[in-house]
Amino acid sequence: PLFTQDMYNFVMFENVALGYNVGTVTATSMDLNTNITYLIITGDQKGVFTIDKTTGLIMTAGVIDREDQSVYHLKVVASGGAVTGEAIVNITVKDLNDNSPHFLHAVESVNVVENWKAGHIVFQAKALDPDESVNGRVTYSLKQNPLGLFHIDTFNGAVSITGALDVSAGSYQVEILASDMGVPQLTSSFILTVSVHDVNDNPPIFDQLSYEVTLLESEPVNSRFFKIHASDKDSGANGEITYRITDGNIGEA
């Protein structure tokens, strides 16, 4: 038998139903009494295609996922008695938007310091989408943006701050959304925890510029006669204050 073509090219979408008609190959024989049968012999390792032995109709027999394999090269044999003929069948699988963008983790955390300036990049978001072309093209936005303190680059996912962060807040919860550009549009999101840490950028400040006290010369040694007070806006160890006399303590009185 001889096929009407040495090579057949068929195009189909992924995720079609089982039994979907992909295309038909045809062979003929000079012997009109010969019954021709068809068989796929190579190129379908997973058995996702089948061929009608008498008509040459190729159909799906399993799930066709473009992200798993986008092109198949089948070799089909037509047999008529002891004589066989061969043809190549190329099947191209077209993409559907069947995958959402995927972040590696559902939750991420990052540490920042309070005095970083607006525009400072604090995190790099990255989502992957195995779909093709616009179906796999990812853009980023902020679904949850506390006090508008954060900004994300639409195309590269860089997260930056728009102003100074408040260390007293402790941390901020930012929800990052990744969207593809397919139809229908698919999305996914994750939570970024931004923890703010103090910088020792505030000096201690006394509650008065100067102090004055009068003592009797009979004041006992080690008696407490006066108390000064200073405060520091920093937090933690940066805000702890110690005192010492640096000048004027004649004779260490």
Image (spheres, rainbow, N blue to C red):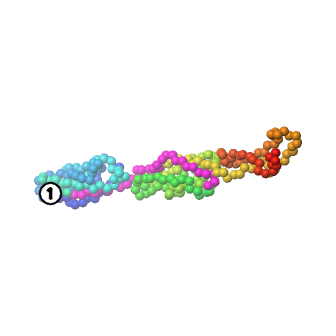
Identify the amino acid type marked 1: Ser
Q: Is residue 138 left or right of residue 64?
A: right
Residue 103 among magenta residues: yes
Where residue 207 appears, x then y in whole percent?
A: 78, 48
Tally of numbered tags: 1
Q: Nearer the viewer, residue 77 or 218?
A: 218
**Quadrant containing the C terminus in the rendered view:** top right
- Which residue is label 1 attached to? 29
Q: Is residue 245 left or right of residue 110?
A: right
Q: Is residue 227 left or right of residue 174?
A: right
Say which element carries label 1. loop
Q: Residue at x 29, y 48 (%)?
A: 46
Q: Which residues are magenta?
A: 87-116
Can residue 186 be seen here? The reply is no
Where residue 222 appears, x then y in whole percent?
A: 80, 39
Q: Residue at x 82, y 40 (%)?
A: 221
**Quadrant containing the N terminus in the rendered view:** bottom left
Q: Nearer the viewer, residue 178 or 10?
A: 178
